[in-house]
Image (tube, rainbow, N blue to C red):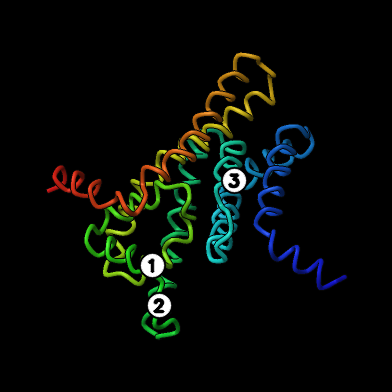
Amino acid sequence: MINKLTKIIKDHFKKFLILGWIVLFVSLLMSNNLRNFALEFCRTYPVYAPIILIITQLFFGLLILPCSPLSAIAGVLWGFELGLVYSIIASLISSTFTFIVGKFFKKKYIIRNIKSEIFKKINALIDKYIWVASAIVHANPVFPGSSVGYVFAFSKIDLKKYVLGAFIGMIPLQIFVVGFGSLSRNWAFDKNIFLLLIIFFLGLIVMIYISIMPKLLKISSLNKFFDIIRKFVK
């Protein structure tokens, strides 16, 4: 019985985690006590609060766990402008750190003889298109942006170009998700119906983005897309 329960938890851990993120997000919106406590903590500790956000995202990124809900929570806690800044910083630090850790593994030959065809195709594209590849991957919601540094570490891309691409690629989804969190907080305070409609449509845009972008950025079509982009950056 215990082994069966352990297997269920192991197989569905990320689903449980996503459910946990949803519960936390809804609790921040619906529970006045929890929301006031979190907002007061951010006001009282303006330095420590964003550091906790960064450390949390860094930890989840290292373990290849979902980090996107943290962006929505940042919007709830700090509003759109400051929340967007903190969320982007946390995402960049997490993604950069997994890149550095991956480089360490590569140099120490801890991981060898990777034979996955998809892995090889991805690395071939990275080596060919450098920072543009980083931007495309970070713009694709299918990939865990805070953890893809592990993959890029095995290519020839250097840290500066990786970070540049990561910054450019993550901005659209960050704006949508942080904005969703910020608007949700405003609705929690005044319960405005018009604001609720805006939140609904923004959430719809996020869902469309998440469903469409992976199809637009399939590995089979990346070469043509990269060739078009390169013409503008030469």
The location of residue 28, given as percent across then percent down, is 71, 38
* Type of the residue with mark 1: Phe
At a point 76% along the width and 40% down the height, the residue shown is 34
List the residue tagged with mark 3: 69
Q: Nearer the viewer, residue 161 or 132?
A: 132
- Residue 37 lies left or right of residue 151; in this view the side is right
* Type of the residue with mark 2: Ile
Is mark 2 in CB contact (under 8 Å) with mark 3?
A: no
Q: Residue 57 occupies which quadrant of the picture?
A: bottom right
The first of marks 2 and 1 along the sequence is 2
The location of residue 78, given as percent across then percent down, is 57, 37
Is mark 3 in CB contact (under 8 Å) with mark 1?
A: no
Closer to viewer: mark 2 or mark 3: 2
List the residue tagged with mark 1: 119
The first of marks 3 and 1 along the sequence is 3
The alpha-carbon separation of the residues under discs 2 and 3 comes to 31 Å
Secondary element under disc 2, as helix, strand or loop, is loop
The alpha-carbon separation of the residues under discs 3 and 1 comes to 27 Å
Secondary element under disc 1, as helix, strand or loop, is helix
* Type of the residue with mark 3: Pro
